[in-house]
Every structure is written in structure tokens, then in C-alpha cells.
Image (tube, rainbow, N blue to C red):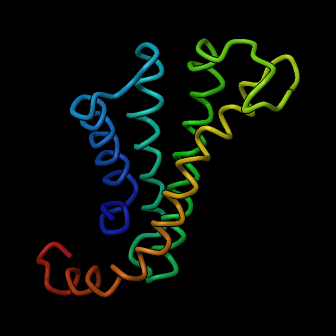
Amino acid sequence: LIGYRHGVSWGFGACMVYGLVDCIVGGGLGWGIVSVLLDYVLAYGAMGVAGLFRKKGLLSLELGVLFGNLARFAVHFIAGITAWKIAVGDTSEIFGMTFGADASVVYSILYNGSYMLPNLLLSLVAMPLLYPAIKKIEKNHPLG
């Protein structure tokens, strides 16, 4: 919402701060500083790309939600195949399915997709419901 109202740089900054606070207050789990930076600071920060679709109506808000969530998923995916590969190792079996010598790509897609897809769908459903309130705030807010 901050990206939608104030643009990419504000959205990126606010989302990065949120990711860091979420990690600290929420007891974030990390495999070293690299995974903390990727999974919290940069992944949430990537949602700031939603600001590319700034103040252009409901369709733009929905596109911002879509691209923001896809950007966050991409960073989580990269963290999964780099920093978290240490935890997965050279596993070839995931959820009873056998893959090639390195299943970190599949694991990252399945693990991160298991929470990012519901997050995306809920966000896409919630935005049209919140849109009238967002427009009302924009009209009445002095910084609009």
C-alpha cells in the first residue's frame, strides 16, 4: 500500500524496514546473515516494486500486488537455492518424490510456493475489498 501511494522507493524502503523488524521481533529464522538479508530484508523490500503501478486504479493495485508478490517469491527462491542449500544439501528426495542429484531448486519452489501462493491469492482477494477505503483515505489525506 505504501508503494501504491508513494512510489517504488518509499515502498522498497518501508518493506525492507518491515522485513527487518519482522525478523527481529518475530524471531526470524536464518542460516547466517546472508539468509536473513535475503529472506527478510531483500525479500520484503522487493515487494516495493508494487509502487511501479502507483495510483492508477484498482487494476494497477492488483498488478502491484501480483508483481510485488512475484518479486518477493523470486528473492525467497534465490535464498532457497543459495543460502538454504546448506540445510537441504544434495538431497534427491523430497516429499517422497525422487529428483536429480540436487533437489534444492524443487525444494525452494515447493517450500516458498507453499506460503507465497496463498499469500498472493489472499492479497488479490483483499485489495478489491479494501480499495474503497484506500480511495477515501487518498481523497481526505493532506499528503494524498
Q: How many numbered marks have been drawn onto this rendered protein structure?
A: 0
Q: Nearer the viewer, residue 67 or 56?
A: 67
Q: Is residue 133 above or below residue 52?
A: below
Q: Residue at x 71, y 25 (%)?
A: 104
Give residue 144's position: percent from left, percent from top: 21, 76
Q: Residue at x 40, y 56 (%)?
A: 8
Give residue 46's position: percent from left, percent from top: 47, 45
| In this rendering, position of residue 118 left or right of residue 136 | right
Q: Is residue 55 above or below residue 47?
A: below
Q: Nearer the viewer, residue 17 or 77?
A: 77
Give residue 62's position: percent from left, percent from top: 50, 73
Q: Is residue 128 above or below residue 107?
A: below
Give residue 136's position: percent from left, percent from top: 22, 87
Q: Nearer the viewer, residue 17 or 56?
A: 17
Quadrant of the image containing the N terminus: bottom left
Q: Residue at x 14, y 78 (%)?
A: 141
Answer with the quarter of the image where residue 22 lies.
top left
Q: Residue at x 40, y 43 (%)?
A: 45
Residue at the extreme front of the image, as rendered:
96
Q: Is residue 76 above or below residue 7?
A: above
| In this rendering, position of residue 108 left or right of residue 142 | right
